[in-house]
Amino acid sequence: MFGYRSGSQGLSDTDVDMQDTTNKHWLDELNPEQRDAATHAKSTPLLVIAGAGTGKTKTLASRVAWLIESGISPSSILLLTFTRRASLEMLDRAGQLVGPAKASQVVGGTFHAVANRLLRQFGPAIGLSPSFSIVDPADSADLIDLIRSDLNLGTTDRRFPRKSTIAAVYSRVVNSRTKLDDVLRVHFPWCIEDADGIRQIVEQFIKRKREQAVLDYDDLLLYLHALLRLPGVCEEVADRFEHVLVDEYQDTNLIQCEILQALRARKRGVMVVGDDAQSIYSFRAASVENILNFPKHFEGARVIKLERNYRSVQPILDASNAVMSRANHQFAKNLVGVRQSEQKPRLVSVQDEAGQSTAVCERILARLEEGTPLKQQAVLFRTGYHSDALEVELARRNIPFVKYGGLKFVEAAHVKDMVALLRLLTNSADEMSWFRVLQLIEGIGPGAARKIIAGLGVGQTNSDPILTLRMDAVQVPAAARFQFAEFARAVLACVDEKPTPAGAIERVRKFYDPIFNRIYDNAALRLRDLEQLEQIAANYTSLVQFVTDMAIDPPSRTQDLAGKPMLEEDFLVLSTIHSAKGCEWGVVHVLHVADGNIPADMACGTDAEIDEERRLFYVAMTRAKDELNLYFPLRYYFKKNKRSDKHSYAQLTRFIPPEHLRFYDAVGGHSPGAKVEVSVSARRVAQEQVDALLTDLFR
DNA sequence: AATATCCGTATTTTT
DNA sequence: TACGGATATT
């Protein structure tokens, strides 16, 4: 099942209770291996190797249900998942088995969300203020940028690495616990010359975040890791959870592994589920070693393999298995399908990207007419912009779609502005928030903002920026005095009146709306976003909770734009392959199955990287239940000069060597609609001829 | 010192 | 398309 219902919908308690009593044998619906895993003896470590489509979610949900039925208190079960969506879906399913009332008490969420909860409670033990701020990667990058200009780095002739690159380097060092030099050498070789600068920046970055009680995603794990090393605290936390279950274990990193070990200090139940063939997050320092070495890390572990694939028809499995058979490192697995079909995956060659968009749309519509709703179809691709051309074509044809992994609501500048101000109310030591918020005032730029921050004593020990603000004891450029006073009034009003989160937004908007009207274009649209934000905030009573969720559980823009009525409608899903992990659709379309895109050019440095790209391709293929379409554009135009007909010829992905073509139906791609594509191409040729003529004349 | 504007160059995937 | 950096304008 793809998609999840929000808690308020779905089965009511009574429905479930009835189902529960009249239909007691939900365990019988599992195959022997799945049942083994779900009912495994309580405290021996358990590793479940679950191949693609082998009923992993069902098994995990059943185990949660079984534990609850055998008397374990739901609130002492911890379910760690890769995304919030996965957690909701599993608990929803468990709820269908044992009743939502019980299932909803299970502690579920991502490592980061759980780290947040534990740190709010136990943080003081490691000197962490309970009102610490959490910042997203963009905020981290901004802080890094601020530090870089403080340190006067990047003024050399050489171009200094981008802020987001430095943030990525830092993240990698922390999560893989590898030395900076080694990380640079292996993963960021073009930054080696800047190692000294990066080191200086990172040093400041760490120091300032600590002084300001600001944590980024990596810090959440790092601090939880540190917390769990404290003898007393470790046991207290470990005592809470009788059972820890981890999903997608192949995509956890070293720190997460150690956190898990610490959580099991009391030697209670631990179960991890994953598939090494679907490990696709090594760029986030995920380490397949975790799952491979689980039996070493957790003594006496039992291993159960799920190898029966219920999802894909056999020809899709055959092709997918062929792809994986060429992997350099593969671990014994024998996926056996249960669904037969005559239809092989379709390998569709098209003239170019425009032809691809046409072919995809036509196939989608053809399947729609045959009765496959859009919701049962998905378009997958390696990188976000790979779907740009298709999105235009879908819009032109009025085919509704939702893109996963697109721009997030909270990533929009105006939303960030508002959230920064709210965050500042919960933690006045947060320098980045001040820096952002102050510069919205007319007449205050980077320079003045720095001075004001220093004047307020932000991030300095024994200082109270809010008090300083109240006493009006800070130098402000004359041109900005009036607006600054207004700003101060808004902040102090929120501090004094302690409004609800929504109330705070309402108050701050009195100050912000005119400013946004001035500095942003299409301000009307942005103001509507703030209304949305206010509505979201209306569900919260705690401001700390609200700004925390905006950082670790941000609402997606698409969801918000879609709204509730839209959710009922039929729409196509567009997704990066990474975001498609764990999902399945009846019909899957994979774009740009050409070398350079899959595998991505930038990921072809080492054999290990190429292997990961291969697994990525495998993940894409195994999302399909009934029909798999792979699209291969024969040529790519260089985009630099739009009039030029210059192009290069593409190669089919190296993951489908000639010997494997027998697993596919080759389709020419010259469907009726290709007329459009042909005329586009003809126009290009004509233009080129005109250009050539003119060039010749004026030579 | 802040703000506007221009230009050249990009390394993907996400909690 | 955005970002980083430089240069011009207020």
Image (spheres, coloured by chain):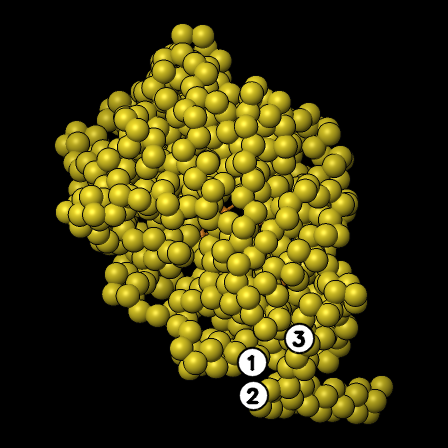
Chain colours: A yellow, B orange, C blue
Q: Provide the secondary structure element on which disc 2 rests.
A: loop
Answer above or below: position of A98 versus A175: below
Q: What residue is pinned by disc 2?
A: A673
Question: In whole angstroms, how far apart are the C-alphas of marks 2 and 1?
Answer: 7 Å
Q: What residue is pinned by disc 3?
A: A665
Quadrant in which the C terminus of chain A appears: bottom right
Question: In whole angstroms, how far apart are the C-alphas of marks 1 and 3?
Answer: 19 Å
Q: Provide the secondary structure element on which disc 3 rests.
A: strand
Residue type (three-letter) at the residue carrying disc 2: Gly
Residue type (three-letter) at the residue carrying disc 3: Asp
State which mark lies toward you, 1 or 3.
3
Q: Nearer the viewer, residue A27 or A185?
A: A27
Q: Nearer the viewer, residue A78 or A443?
A: A78
Q: What chain does mark 3 sit on?
A: A
Answer above or below: position of A97 versus A656: above
Query: Is residue A442 rendered to the left or right of residue B7?
Result: left
| Mark 2 crowdedness (10 Å alpha carbons): few <14, some 14-19, many ≥20 | some
